Image (cartoon, rainbow, N blue to C red):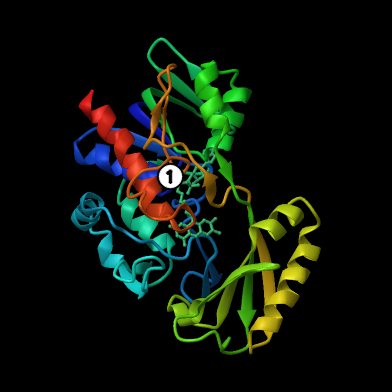
């Protein structure tokens, strides 16, 4: 496949970059290892396509938008039609935490529109060519492009660069190596009734094993009582590489103590790169080898907000948008 611009990763950052470029009639393709779009903006369903009994947003729970330019773009792309205000913001009650009606992944799908996304293609090697770049996928597919924007979490990009024996300037590598992510172990539980978590279903625990509990029925996305429990960063780090079924049992027991309903079933999901805790203080980077990097490892948008409450989805989108605008300006 040959395209002027290839974007690695169809999370919100890659999708925003692609949408920005395609709005200006540029031919752009995305490639993602996942079966769908959205990356960490993810929704899992219980039941079959015709009869969905329950849902879990098992990654990001909400999105806040402060940037007037991003809000305008989202409106123009009809992405706000799927969003509803859910809870007032942490730091600014006037900035609502929004959620889509049927789950966070619907927002990513709205953002994707009819963009060409090559799904289920894990990129395992990048090669610099006379024309620009070739991205090689695990399944043997080759994507040739003049320009590549990578929106992979930076540690994953560095792994890819290492496996590709890609030359990266030492100073640039040093900057990239500073990016750090939390890990998150997430429990997806089916309940036998209401959790008793209160009006909006969102409870921050932030101590010991648990970080947040979110009743997905009270949140308004699940027909049946389901609950998501994000374990704390410390617990997730300690347990990430240990036996997952034991970790699930420990989280399940901690959750059970906090809710009124009984947990019927529980699955565990691991996010190796969940939320960035150390980011690069620029909206995006163009490396001296010509590659563009964007994503939530960069600081884009309103940094007057405390870093631990930083709107990460918005920042990731603004990062993708900044890389796209830079390319357009060239
Ligand atoms: C548990 C959890 C809770 C969160 N809660 C919130 C919240 O409530 N609000 C908020 O604003 N943010 C939240 N976040 C953070 C937010 O989800 C992310 O900051 C944002 O979604 C990042 O988007 P992105 O496009 O930069 O990266 P991603 O969504 O990670 O997109 C990168 C994409 O690259 C793909 N990829 C990776 N490697 C390859 C490869 N080799 N080849 C091809 N494709 C590849 C992945 O499949 C993925 O789709 C949360 C995250 C997690 C995990």
Residue 225 place in picture, x, y as percent: 55, 83
Quadrant in which residue 235 is drawn: bottom right
Quadrant in which residue 270 is drawn: bottom right
Is residue 53 among what the camera can see?
no
Residue 257 place in picture, x, y as percent: 71, 83
Number of marks present in the image shown:
1
Left or right of 118, for residue 80: left
Q: Which residue is nearer to you in this view: 174 or 189?
A: 174
Identity of the residue drawn at 23% across and 59% down: 78
Image quadrant holding the C terminus, namely top left
Dot 1 crowding, Cα within 10 Å, few <14, some 14–19, many 20+: many
Identity of the residue drawn at 55% across and 17% down: 170
Q: Which residue is nearer to you in this view: 308 or 121?
A: 308
- Does residue 198 lie above or below 292 as drawn? below
Query: Helix, strand, or loop for circle 1?
Result: loop
- Does residue 174 lie above or below 103 as drawn? above
Left or right of 242, for residue 114: left
- Does residue 111 lie above or below 10 as drawn? below
Residue 3 place in picture, x, y as percent: 34, 27
Is the distance from the Cβ of mark 1 to the nearest ligand 1 atom less than 8 Å?
yes
Q: Which residue is mark 1?
A: 10
Left or right of 141, for residue 272: right
Residue 251 place in picture, x, y as percent: 72, 70
Is residue 4 among what the camera can see?
yes
Identity of the residue drawn at 43% across and 60% down: 105
């Amino acid at each position: 496949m040959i395209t002027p611009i290839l974007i690695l990763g169809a999370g919100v950052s890659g999708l925003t970059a692609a949408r920005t470029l395609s709005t200006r009639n540029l031919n752009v393709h995305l490639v993602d290892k996942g079966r769908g779009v959205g990356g960490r903006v993810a929704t899992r369903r219980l039941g079959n396509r015709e009869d969905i009994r329950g849902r879990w947003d098992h990654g990001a729970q909400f999105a806040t938008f402060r940037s007037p330019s991003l809000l305008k773009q989202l409106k123009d792309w009809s992405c706000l039609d799927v969003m509803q205000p859910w809870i007032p913001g942490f730091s600014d009650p006037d900035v609502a935490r929004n959620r889509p009606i049927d789950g966070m992944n619907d927002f990513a799908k709205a953002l994707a529109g009819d963009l060409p996304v090559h799904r289920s293609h894990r990129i395992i090697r990048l090669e610099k060519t006379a024309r620009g770049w070739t991205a090689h996928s695990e399944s043997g597919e080759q994507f040739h492009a003049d320009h590549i924007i990578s929106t992979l979490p930076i540690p994953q990009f560095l792994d890819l660069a290492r496996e590709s024996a890609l030359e990266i300037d030492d100073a640039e590598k040093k900057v990239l190596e500073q990016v750090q992510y939390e890990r998150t172990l997430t429990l997806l539980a089916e309940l036998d009734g209401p959790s008793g978590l209160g009006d909006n279903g969102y409870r921050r625990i932030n101590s010991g094993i648990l970080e947040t509990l979110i009743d997905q029925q009270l949140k308004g996305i699940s027909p049946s009582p389901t609950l998501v429990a994000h374990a704390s960063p410390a617990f997730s780090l300690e347990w990430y590489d240990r036996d997952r079924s034991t970790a699930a049992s420990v989280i399940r027991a901690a959750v059970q103590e906090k809710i009124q309903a009984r947990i019927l079933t529980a699955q565990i999901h691991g996010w190796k790169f969940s939320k960035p805790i150390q980011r690069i203080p620029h909206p995006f980077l163009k490396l001296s080898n010509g590659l563009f990097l964007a994503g939530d490892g960069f600081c884009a948008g309103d940094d007057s907000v405390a870093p631990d409450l930083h709107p990460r989805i918005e920042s990731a989108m603004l990062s993708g948008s900044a890389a796209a605008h830079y390319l357009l300006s060239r």
